[in-house]
Image (cartoon, helix red, strand yellow):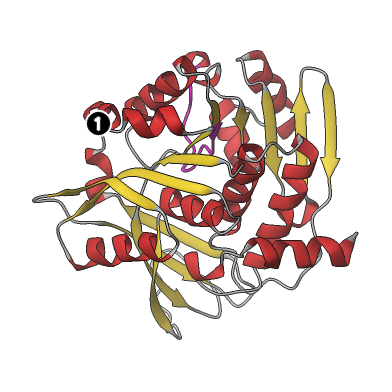
């Protein structure tokens, strides 16, 4: 039986410019190719999960403008149910200004726009979608209180909750205790925990109630930490040209694995493969792989 995922989160249009390097403070440099891509961490993770073959619904907000229309069309192309994505008057659709350097590294500034309107009212209207989902996926590009309420609703219904704390901010034990799988990168883990090292961050996050901590480490793979111990799961070696949606590829594929009943380790390996494929392609949603793409890399490796 195909798993079902509900994503509560952001939808942005990514405005991407390529450059040989990132500018210094106060510096202007000439860039290269410019392009727009459907993005937003919530929408990216929804697309990443859908391309793994699970059924996906999304709750979010866009503005009543051209970017909003384009983002809704993009969700439809991947078969994502957008019935609970609200079109908001007098608010611009969220955008992300992204610079990608010659090594595929990126810097991102987000203007959240309509994403900041997402509220408990929108969640309540999507109660049926919560009830039918196996896994709820959350990020932090929408109001924190809305994220908290979504996690509460899902836990009350006995659903698994995945939280990707990006962009990072301090989080309290109440919210963390509602999360089954907490997926930061190394820097986000330290920022959320208020720690000076990854080791201290892991200890603090587990003490604050995180059940399963998955720290993504890029080319170094993933560190899985629970109260029972730690394990490292290696990444796939590929030549990266654009890392913009690698984290979202990981979260979406991992959540799809969970929804389909995979063991934790197998879901992480699937997610590592999806992330590896994504960094070999340009753009956010255009880079996100299908199930067959990820399986091809898994079979080649193992």
Residue 12, picture quadrant: bottom left
Magenta: main secondary structure: loop
Q: Give the number of callouts.
A: 1
User: Can residue 162 be seen at all in this image of the molecule?
Assistant: yes
User: Can residue 284 be seen at all in this image of the molecule?
Assistant: no
169 or 147, which is in the foreground?
147
Is 124 magenta? The answer is no
Per the image, the residue denoted by label 1 is 125
Task: From the top left corner, tell me how far across and down residue 254 is, in percent.
Answer: 65, 45
Residue name at image x 44 percent, y 32 percent: 132
Asked if residue 182 is positioned above or below residue 232 in the image, the reply reads above
Is 170 magenta? The answer is yes
95 or 63, which is in the foreground?
63
Give the secondary structure at mark 1.
Answer: helix
Asked if residue 17 is positioned above or below residue 302 in the image, the reply reads below
Residue 120, picture quadrant: top left
Task: From the top left corner, tell me how far across and down residue 153 is, in percent.
Answer: 40, 21
Q: Which residues are magenta?
A: 162-172
Asked if residue 214 is positioned above or below residue 26 in the image, the reply reads above
Q: Quadrant of the N terminus?
A: top right
């Amino acid at each position: 039986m195909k798993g079902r995922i509900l994503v509560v989160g952001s939808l942005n249009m990514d405005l991407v410019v390529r450059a040989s390097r990132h500018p210094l403070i106060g510096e202007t440099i000439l860039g290269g190719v410019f392009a727009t891509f459907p993005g937003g961490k919530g929408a990216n993770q929804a697309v990443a999960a859908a391309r793994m073959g699970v059924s996906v619904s999304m709750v979010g907000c866009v503005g009543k403008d051209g970017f909003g229309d384009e983002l809704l069309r993009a969700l439809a192309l991947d078969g994502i149910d957008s019935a609970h994505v609200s079109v908001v008057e007098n608010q611009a659709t969220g955008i992300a200004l992204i610079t990608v350097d010659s090594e595929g590294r990126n810097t991102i500034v987000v203007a959240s726009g309509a994403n900041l309107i997402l509220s408990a009212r929108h969640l309540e209207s999507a109660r049926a979608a919560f009830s039918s989902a196996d896994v709820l996926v959350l990020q932090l590009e929408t109001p924190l209180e809305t994220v908290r309420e979504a996690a509460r609703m899902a836990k009350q219904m006995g659903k698994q909750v995945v939280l990707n704390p990006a962009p990072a901010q301090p989080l309290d034990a109440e919210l963390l205790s509602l999360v089954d799988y907490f997926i930061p990168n190394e820097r986000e883990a330290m920022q959320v925990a208020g720690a000076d090292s990854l080791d201290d961050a892991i200890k603090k996050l587990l003490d604050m109630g995180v059940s399963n901590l998955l720290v993504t480490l890029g080319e170094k793979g993933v560190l899985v930490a629970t109260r029972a111990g730690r394990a490292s799961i290696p990444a796939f070696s590929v030549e990266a040209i654009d890392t913009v949606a690698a984290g979202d590829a990981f979260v979406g594929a991992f959540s799809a694995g969970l929804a389909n009943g995979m063991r934790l380790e197998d879901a992480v390996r699937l997610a590592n493969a999806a992330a590896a494929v994504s960094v070999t392609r340009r753009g956010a949603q255009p880079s996100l792989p299908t199930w067959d793409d990820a399986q091809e890399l898994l079979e080649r490796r193992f």
